Image (cartoon, rainbow, N blue to C red):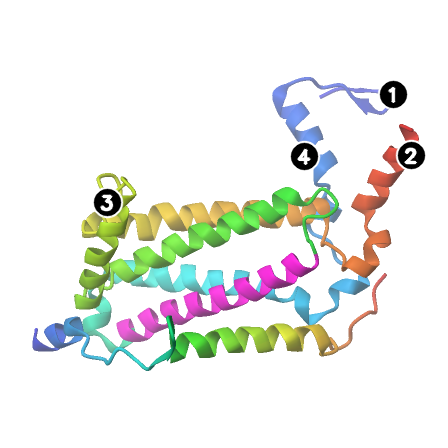
Amino acid sequence: MTHLDGIETDNTWTGRTRRWLLKRLPPDKLLPNTQPSYVASWIYVFGMGAIASLLFIIVSGVVLSFNGPMWYHLSVLGHFVNSVHLWSVEFFFFFMVIHMWGKFWMAAWRGHRVLTWITGVVSFAVSIVAAFTGYLVQTNFDSEWIAFQAKDALNAAGIGAWFNVTNFGQMFMWHILLLPAAVFVIVAMHIVLVRVHGVVPPLEADDTDAQLVGQEASHVATH
Amino acid sequence: MIGMLVAGADLSPAGIFLRWGIFSIQLGNLLVIIAMLVLFAVALVLPFPGGRRDK
């Protein structure tokens, strides 16, 4: 790394990547210690509620994975952990739906935040698939019934050969590895985008949005 | 083994279903949707404790 008149001139890919990251997401934006006053509202807490629920889902899921999908049939502790896993999912969707309603009605895609909105919607969709595969790995007659109903819909859509809901091993791997990894990555992208662009203000506080102020300034400068 | 079979059989009832014409919904699902709507409305009007101090 070299410095010329205070300007970093390192042109390695690592140096360029570091400069790009520091420009888009400086440490004070990544880990802010203050937020705008409009964030002090109950409607802004549901996203964090969904993240807290997701942590409970992951931790209880990891504990279940130590003992396998049949554990909860035979153990009181297993039944408790399985119930924590189920209720964390219930709260996850409960909070995520209210979070989505709040963001929809404040048009949260304003101020270059369209990717934040899109990653939120995609995480919702992928989470639904992850939850559905959870119903398939209950190892009881309920899961068998659900699998045999779902296979007809998936075969009608032409994907039953690749996503076979009657194949327990395949559905188990989708449920404990592939879909959780996808949810985790998309939620992480969503959170990073919230940090990059800042928390969206309410509609009546549009003029305080640094993202929109910058947009208007560039608009004036080019006309 | 018997306990496992009983647990696997899932003998719990299907739940209460409410029907209005072609529309039908399980009572539990309806209660969750109502709870979400109530919490959404309350979040809009309830003051946040210690709020509006920064910036």
Q: Provide the secondary structure element on which disc 1 rests.
A: loop
Quadrant of the rendered structure where residue A138 is? bottom left
| Residue A183 counted in the magenta span | no
Q: Which of A174 and A73 is in front in this view?
A: A174
Badge nearest the viewer, 1 or 2: 2
Hey, what amino acid is under mark 1?
Asp
Q: Mark 3 near mark 2, Cβ–Cβ under 8 Å?
A: no
Disc 4 residue type (three-letter)? Leu
Number of residues whose C-alpha sits closer than 10 Å to that of mark 2, classed few (under 14), some (14–19) or many (20 or more): few
**Chain letter of disc 3 in the image:** A
Q: Please, which residue is most extreme toward the left here?
A: B2
The magenta stretch is A78-106
Mark 4 to mark 2: distance in Å? 28 Å
Residue type at the position of mark 2:
Val
Q: Label 3, secondary structure: give it.
A: helix
Q: Mark 1 and mark 3: span between their CA atoms? A: 65 Å
Instruction: Give how far apart the Cα atoms at labels 1 and 2 are.
Output: 31 Å
Where does label 4 land, which residue? Answer: A21
Task: Output the chain of dot 2.
Answer: A
Left-right relation of B47 to B33: right
From what the image shows, is residue A19 above or below residue A78? above
**Quick check: marks 4 and 3 in contact, CB under 8 Å?**
no
Q: Which chain carries label 4?
A: A
Q: Kindly report the secondary structure that dominates the magenta region of the rendered protein.
A: helix
Task: Answer with mark 1 or mark 2, whichever residue precedes in sequence.
Answer: 1
Looking at marks 4 and 2 on the same chain, the residue that comes earlier in the sequence is marked by 4
